[in-house]
Image (cartoon, rainbow, N blue to C red):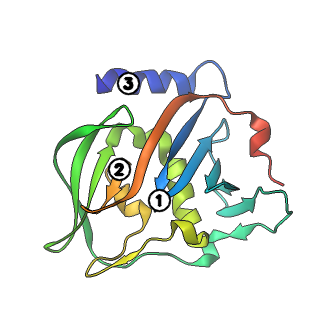
Amino acid sequence: MRLLACLACLVLLTAGDSRAGILVEGLFNGQPLRAELGSDRSLVLVSVAGSRHLVDVASQYIYPMDGTGGAPIQAAIAGDIGSLLPYTLRKWSAGPQVAGHASTYHVLQVDEQICGEVLASAWMTRFIEPIIRSIELMQRVDPALQPVDRENCGVIPFTVYARNGWPLMAGWVDEATFLTKTVRFDHHPDDALFQKP
């Protein structure tokens, strides 16, 4: 079944309508997150709690899209986020479906300390990697996406959760840091949405 889904995505992304893209919707730290990828794989439109930004993952510039004419932000100079702890993300078993997609259950650790759980989809990574990168860049500049410091586990950046695939759900036993609501590979955004201001 996963192979058929992966093949269908490959066909959608490589053939036919050049506007075929990807839509991801979810909750990040309890805030609504929407990310759209169009025909230009280096540009991702990211909305966090209604605030829209165009993220150029190649140049690492973030362009405010709220109409105020704000200057672009160079996320690369905002510095890295997260702790430099030796995180490991180990696959334990098959996981439940999340947002209609099969998952694999992983445990995030620092040495013997359990620091989180991740339900991931490995086959999505190839297609959704620009969205992963855009979220990592947005974490550097948007306080709503900045990770919370947890005792003995430090500040865990989104890219750690995404090491073994798209994190359909990631976080702690008591709360999800990130929860995917929708992943669509048949999204057809208008290219005009991705014009830099």
Determine whether 9 is above or below 24 in the image. Answer: above
The x and y percentages for residue 101 are 35, 33
Label 2 to label 1: alpha-carbon separation:
12 Å
The x and y percentages for residue 185 are 52, 30
Crowdedness near tag 2: few (<14), some (14–19) or many (≥20) residues, C-alpha within 10 Å: many
Crowdedness near tag 3: few (<14), some (14–19) or many (≥20) residues, C-alpha within 10 Å: few
Which residue was labeled with disc 1?
30
Q: Tell me which residue sits at (66%, 56%) in the image.
A: 55
Q: Amino acid at mark 1?
A: Gly
Q: Is residue 43 left or right of residue 148?
A: right
* Residue 181 shows in the view: yes
Q: Is residue 47 left or right of residue 9?
A: right
Picture quarter with the N terminus: top left
Label 1 to label 3: alpha-carbon separation:
29 Å
Q: Is residue 38 left or right of residue 65?
A: left
Q: What SS does tag 3 mark?
A: helix
Q: Amino acid at mark 2?
A: Met
Q: Tell me which residue sits at (47%, 38%) in the image.
A: 182
Picture quarter with the C terminus: bottom right
The x and y percentages for residue 27 are 47, 53
Which sits earlier in the primary sequence, circle 2 or circle 3? 3
Which residue was labeled with disc 3?
5
Which sits earlier in the primary sequence, circle 1 or circle 3? 3
Q: Amino acid at mark 3?
A: Ala
Which residue was labeled with disc 2?
169
* Residue 57 shows in the view: no
Label 2 to label 3: alpha-carbon separation:
19 Å
